[in-house]
Each structure stands twice: as structure tokens, then as C-alpha cells.
């Protein structure tokens, strides 16, 4: 039987070492298993919120914090480059890539490009803002959409203007430095071979510990995985 933790470990190490996701056939060879058993294990991991699969091919689309498809966040560390799903995921990708990296993105996913530097786990230079418009209780309704909306801005006024321009309800706004500290703990064990997905109760406690409060961050502390 292919466990969640072993499958997740193989996926994470592929992103960290090569910058992209392993295919089903590659995973079958790595795990000495049949492609059909890998497909079954990937579907189970998706139900566990450990991966998002392409709806037609069944191949890996997203394994947070990484994306196998292009996004607004490009992360480079040493000789590895990869896409992250959002500002939160970009900070998580930096963490898994060793704590030092550059992130290239555009403010509000529009026209102005910025490059963010993280060195030894510390943000260098500008401390931008992250907008979280989707309540965490609804994050997994469409997690691809949720991630696409977690963008960077220079000011709260810029967030307000963006929300009005795109008819997006304003959510919570947090400094990137706080999100970095949160992501370091959230993603800190994603390379562990005995990885276990955060439960909703654990996620709620993590939000509170890092000062992430208010309606956007309220989730039911049930015995499920976030």
C-alpha cells in the first residue's frame, strides 16, 4: 500500500530537487508500484488535501506550495526554479528550498513586476502586503481559485482600488513578513518522510499563533484535514 506520507515525500523532493512534479509513471518506478496503484494513491491523497490533480489526465497539477502549471509567482533558489501558487505558497516554497530565494511576481497580478528577496529565512527590502479575499472556511471549495487570489500589494489603498476595479470583496490584509513566518511553520515539515496534513484544529491554532485573526481566518475546528 502506498501511504500518503511516502507519496507526498516523493512529490515534494521532485519539486525541490528538479523544479517540477513527477509523472505517474515516474512515481510508479520510484515506489516499485503499478501506474494504476499510483493513480489510486494520488486520488486518495487529493481527498486528503495533499495534492490537486489535473481533471483530465490525473497527473499532478498542484502540490502546495508548488504548482506544475505556470502561476504569478516564480521562485528561484540556487539552480532550481519553480512556480508557487500564491504569496503564501511562495514563502513556503522558499522555506522548502533552503530559506534563501528570489520571488518574481506582479502586484495584484497586473502589470507592475517586483522581485522579493528572502535570505536565510529573513525578508530583505520591501515588506509588501498580502491580500486574502477568500475565507479559509471556503478555501478548498476551489483551491486553485483561492490561491490565485492571494496576491501582493504595496498599500491598503492599493488593495481597496484593486478590489473595486475587479469587483472582489475585500478580505484580510497581512504584512508579507508575517506571512513568511507563518509559512515557515506551515510548510516546515512538508519534506518529512512521516508528513501528516494539518487538521482543521491544528490549522486554526496556527492561524491564531501567527496573529491571523478575523472572519477570513475562522474555520471549524473539526477532525478533518485543512
Image: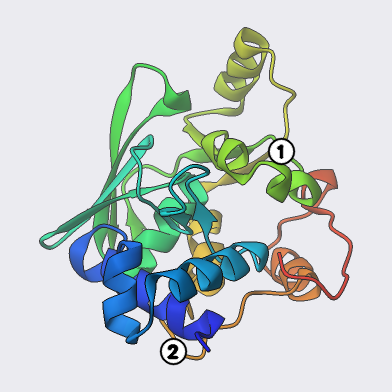
Q: Quadrant of the C terminus?
A: bottom right
The label on residue 134 is 1
Classify 10 Å Cα crowding around label 2: few (below 14), some (14-19), many (20 and above): some
Q: Is residue 197 above or below residue 155?
A: below
Judged by depth in the image, the label closer to the viewer, 2 or 1, is: 2
Q: In this view, does 177 lie to the left or right of 139?
A: left
Give x and y (percent) for residue 144: 56, 41
In the image, 215 versus 125, the foreground residue is: 215
Q: Is residue 35 left or right of residue 75?
A: right
**Residue 215 seen in render:** yes
Give x and y (percent) for residue 62: 46, 53
Residue at 62% across / 75% down in the picture?
197
The label on residue 26 is none
The label on residue 193 is 2
Residue at 38% across / 77% down in the picture?
34
Q: In this view, does 168 lie above or below 149?
A: above
Residue 33 falls in which quadrant of the image? bottom left
Q: In this view, does 8 lie to the left or right of 130?
A: left
Amino acid at each position: 500500500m502506498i501511504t500518503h506520507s511516502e507519496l507526498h515525500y516523493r512529490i515534494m523532493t521532485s519539486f525541490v530537487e528538479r523544479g517540477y512534479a513527477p509523472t505517474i509513471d515516474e512515481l510508479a518506478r520510484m515506489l516499485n508500484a503499478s501506474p494504476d496503484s499510483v493513480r489510486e494513491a494520488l486520488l486518495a491523497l487529493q481527498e486528503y488535501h495533499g495534492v490537486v490533480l489535473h481533471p483530465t489526465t490525473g497527473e499532478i497539477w498542484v502540490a502546495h506550495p508548488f504548482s506544475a502549471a505556470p502561476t504569478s509567482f516564480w521562485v528561484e533558489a540556487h539552480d532550481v526554479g519553480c512556480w508557487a501558487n500564491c504569496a503564501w505558497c511562495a514563502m513556503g516554497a522558499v522555506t522548502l528550498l533552503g530559506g534563501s530565494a528570489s520571488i518574481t511576481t506582479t502586484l495584484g497580478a497586473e502589470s507592475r513586476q517586483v522581485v522579493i528577496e528572502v535570505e536565510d529565512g529573513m525578508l530583505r527590502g520591501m515588506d509588501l502586503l498580502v491580500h486574502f479575499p477568500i475565507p479559509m472556511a471556503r478555501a478548498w471549495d476551489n483551491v486553485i481559485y483561492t490561491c490565485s487570489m492571494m496576491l501582493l500589494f504595496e498599500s491598503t489603498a492599493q488593495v481597496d482600488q484593486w478590489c473595486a476595479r475587479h469587483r472582489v470583496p475585500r478580505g484580510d490584509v497581512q504584512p508579507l513578513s508575517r506571512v513568511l513566518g507563518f509559512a515557515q511553520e506551515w510548510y516546515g515539515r512538508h519534506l518529512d518522510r512521516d508528513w501528516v496534513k494539518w487538521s482543521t484544529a491544528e490549522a486554526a491554532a496556527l492561524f491564531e499563533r501567527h496573529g491571523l485573526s478575523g472572519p477570513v481566518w475562522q474555520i471549524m475546528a473539526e477532525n478533518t484535514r485543512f
